Amino acid sequence: MDREARHSMSEPEICIRKVQKKDYKKVVKISIDSFPEEDAEEIITSLFEIEHFYVAELGGGEGVVVGFVVFGIYSIKTTHIMILAVESAHRRKGIGSKLLERVIEITDMLPINLIRLEVRLTNTAAIKFYEEYGFKITGTIKQYYDDLSDAYLMTRKIEKI
Ligand SMILES: CC(C)(COP(=O)(O)OP(=O)(O)OC[C@H]1O[C@@H](n2cnc3c(N)ncnc32)[C@H](O)[C@@H]1OP(=O)(O)O)[C@@H](O)C(=O)NCCC(=O)NCCS
């Protein structure tokens, strides 16, 4: 059975929508769970007004928020994924993929030829996840994080037809 079939069997309806004020607490909770090394609340507070902040809601309508992604378009040529996370109980069901697909969809509509992000060297799950989507490790950024850990820079080129 292919991935799409497996994910559609194990996962009910997922809706990707813009974040709303009512989502704040849940998004902070997912961040604390996903990034124990960071000051998750400070990060989410600083990103909350960003235009491209989407949540994944399980069960449609008034469903439960189980993941989110925040990205920025800083120059006309690059999309920067700042943070993407899925609640641990809901991983490996295709939700991260749906969030990343939204980033790619929006990027495809713009004159952008690169998506970039940073990831901890020890975060093998995220590295594998991004590699599945054609991202490659293209550099190391020394002391990128507040605790002075290094980050890999991962990038994916966007081919425009
Ligand atoms: C990385 C993360 C977002 C992936 O979300 P997810 O919803 O579990 O991802 P998906 O179910 O869409 O996975 C798609 C594919 O990525 C790969 N993948 C995802 N997690 C993986 C893991 N732990 N180990 C190996 N491969 C993995 C697999 O190929 C997977 O397909 P499969 O399940 O059919 O094998 C999630 O693990 C997470 O929230 N981690 C903590 C936060 C984080 O590190 N964010 C990234 C840095 S900003």
Image: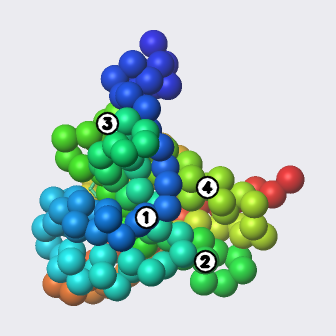
**Which three-letter amino acid code belongs to the residue tagged 4?**
Ile
Q: Residue tagged by mark 3?
A: 92
Q: Position of residue 92 (x, y in %)?
A: 31, 36
What element does badge 3 sit on? loop
Q: Is residue 141 visible?
A: yes
Q: Is residue 12 above or below residue 79?
A: above
What's the residue at 20%, 46% (across, down)? Answer: 88
Q: Nearer the viewer, residue 64 or 69?
A: 64
Distance of mark 4 from mark 3, alpha carbons? 19 Å
Q: Which dot marks residue 19?
A: 1
The yes-or-no answer for disc 3 within 8 Å of ligand 1 is yes
Sequence-wise first label, 4 or 3: 3
What's the residue at 43%, 32% (across, down)? Answer: 13
Q: 36 left or right of 81?
A: left
Dots 4, 3 in contact, CB < 8 A = no
**Which three-letter amino acid code belongs to the residue tagged 3?**
Arg
Q: Residues within 10 Å of mark 4 (few under 14, many from 20)?
A: some
Q: Residue tagged by mark 2?
A: 73
Q: Position of residue 148 (x, y in %)?
A: 20, 86
What's the residue at 49%, 25% (across, down)? Answer: 4
What element does badge 4 sit on? helix
Sequence-wise first label, 1 or 3: 1
In this view, the residue farthest toward the top is: 1
Q: Which dot marks residue 104?
A: 4
Distance of mark 3 from mark 2, alpha carbons? 28 Å
Ligand 1 falls in quadrant: top left
The yes-or-no answer for disc 4 within 8 Å of ligand 1 is no
Q: Is residue 128 visible?
A: no
Q: Quadrant of residue 27?
A: bottom left
